Image (spheres, helix red, strand yellow):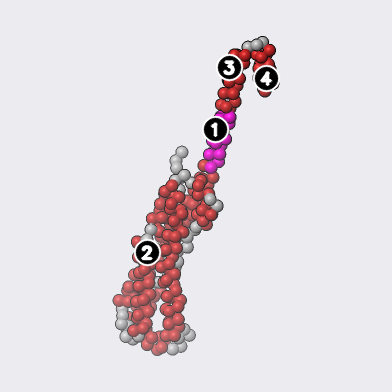
């Protein structure tokens, strides 16, 4: 093709057709420029297509992670509400005063309390942010939710950490002192459960759990989960 164009130029020059040659040369330059622009456009289109494929894979992974996060969050929320209801009922029985009926009811409620913490899937979000893949995501609103997710999660988990620090450092050590876990000295346990300190321990436990419930209801974590799921939902077509 290059030889073909060169031959045309040579023929025009040899025939003395300078004007025709100039017009031809300009036309050739224009054609070359158009070719370059088309090649760039095709290259840009291809790169954009690759970016959109990569973006969709990222969004799909985040979407799946946060659907799991929602299931775990809803489960954690239900259990904590149930725990709080049990603790409210237990505190309402105070003072126990060696009353066997109250104590038996108290212990039944105690069996209903489950230990649980919120464990979220965040590896995909962290990978996206740390690898600078965030720029592949076109939705700016989604970008903001993803960037702030770690901080929102940590803020919520602070309340859980406070609760379990209290349980491990105050509550359980006290119960070990009050109860005979061999079951031989039941009188020791009955007396311990009738003290003000025992009652205060459970009231304190309830108050810490209320902080978790408050965080569930007032902090933005649940909204973050729902919005990230919504914004990463595959679009029809």
- What residue lies at 57% left-to-right and 35% top-to-bottom? 43
- The answer to if 50 sits in the magenta stretch is yes
Q: Looking at the picture, does residue 218 appear above or below residue 234?
A: below
**CA gap, disc 3 to disc 4?**
14 Å
**CA gap, disc 4 to disc 1?**
27 Å
Q: Please state if 105 lies on the left or on the right of 169 as rendered.
A: left
- What residue lies at 32% left-to-right and 73% top-to-bottom? 88
Q: Dot 4, how many residues are within 10 Å of its Cα: few (below 14), some (14-19), or many (20+)? A: few
What secondary structure is the stretch in magenta mostly built from? helix
Q: Which residue is mark 1?
A: 41
**CA gap, disc 2 to disc 1?**
51 Å
Q: Which residue is mark 3?
A: 23
- Secondary structure beneath dot 4 equals helix
Nearer to us: label 4 or label 1:
4
Q: Which residue is mark 2?
A: 215
Q: Position of residue 54 (x, y in %)?
A: 54, 45
Q: Which residue is mark 4?
A: 6
- The answer to if 223 sits in the magenta stretch is no
Q: Are marks 4 and 1 in contact (CB under 8 Å)?
A: no
Nearer to us: label 2 or label 1:
1
Q: Earlier in the sequence, mark 3 or mark 4?
A: 4
């Amino acid at each position: 093709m290059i030889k073909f164009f060169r031959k045309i130029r040579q023929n025009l020059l040899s025939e003395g057709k300078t004007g025709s040659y100039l017009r031809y040369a300009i036309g050739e330059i224009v054609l070359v420029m158009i070719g370059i622009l088309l090649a760039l456009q095709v290259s840009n289109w291809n790169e954009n297509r690759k970016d959109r494929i990569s973006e969709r894979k990222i969004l799909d992974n985040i979407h799946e992670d946060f659907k799991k996060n929602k299931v775990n969050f809803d489960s954690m929320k239900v259990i904590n509400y149930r725990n709080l209801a049990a603790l409210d009922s237990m505190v309402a029985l105070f003072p126990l005063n060696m009353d066997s009926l109250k104590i038996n009811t108290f212990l039944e409620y105690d069996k209903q309390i489950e230990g649980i913490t919120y464990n979220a899937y965040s590896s995909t979000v962290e990978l996206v942010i740390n690898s600078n893949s965030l720029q592949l995501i076109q939705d700016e609103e989604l970008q903001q939710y993803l960037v702030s997710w770690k901080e929102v999660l940590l803020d919520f988990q602070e309340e859980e950490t406070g609760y379990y620090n209290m349980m491990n450092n105050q509550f359980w050590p006290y119960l070990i002192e009050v109860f005979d876990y061999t079951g031989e000295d039941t009188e020791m346990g009955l007396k311990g459960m009738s003290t003000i300190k025992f009652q205060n321990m459970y009231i304190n436990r309830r108050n810490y759990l209320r902080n978790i419930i408050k965080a569930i209801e007032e902090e933005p974590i649940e909204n973050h989960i729902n919005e990230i799921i919504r914004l990463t939902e595959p679009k029809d077509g």
